[in-house]
Amino acid sequence: MSHIWVQNESTKDAVNKISVGWHSDNYKKTGCYNLYCLGFVQIHPQKYIGSQVDQTSIYDGTMIELIISITQDPDTENWWINYQGENIGYFPSKLFSNMNSADQVGWGGRTMTPPNTPAPPMGSGYFPDRNFAHACYFKHISFQNASRSDYGPTFDDVGTFNDNPNCFGVMYYEDLGGDTGYSLQFGGPGGNCGN
């Protein structure tokens, strides 16, 4: 299992960071995050995993989009992390014994809190409403088949999961065309969600 997410740390000087990691045993003993991954090969001189995201979107205003991908090089089979159109580094293929294909791919959000405490907002803090200037979103969602052709997931391919619809929402729109393509929105205000 590999992950890319934007994370707001729970410190007094909280910042948004892009985090990347992998686990092969469902978070039990293996895996790592960011530059703590001993096998990760950093190649970009300024951009790195775990770095701060300086700008964030404004509700109903300026949207800041992060373009992120994980792709496998067909020759070396290394897994490359690309951020804003630039390769920042890769995980060598020798780290993964069973990564020739995937039976599941996911996009979305998650919040975590100690038990019996209010959940923080997710994304922009607003529920999905089909307006991409409101809730957090993923656009141009795609994956590659064995012949390395990109395609987006159809409704039949997608299952949504939301363990607390009173506090958060998720909506998959399939292909909206234009500058949006296959897309989804997620997020919500959080609050007393009964965790």
Image (spheres, helix red, strand yellow):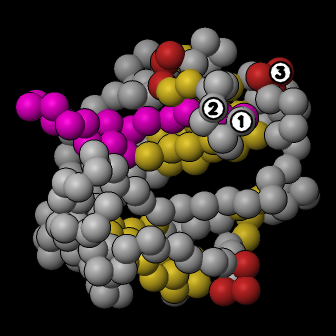
Mark sitting earlier along the chain (3/2): 2
Mark 1 residue type? Asp
Residue found at x 90% / y 58%: 147
Which region of the structure is painted magenta? 6-24
> Which SS class for mark 3?
helix
Quadrant of the image occupied by residue 119? bottom left
What residue occupies the far front of the structure in this picture?
A: 116
Q: Is residue 172 magenta?
A: no
Residue 74 visible to the viewer: no
Residue matched to label 1: 25
The residues tagged by marks 3 and 1 sit, at their Cα atoms, a distance apart of 17 Å
The reply, left or right, for residue 67 in relation to residue 151 is left
Q: Which residue is mark 3?
A: 94
Residue in the image at 18% along x and 67% along y: 191
The disc placed on residue 28 is 2
Helix, strand, or loop for circle 2?
loop
Measuring from the top left, give residue 125's x and y in whole percent.
20, 67
Against 68, residue 23 (above or below) is above
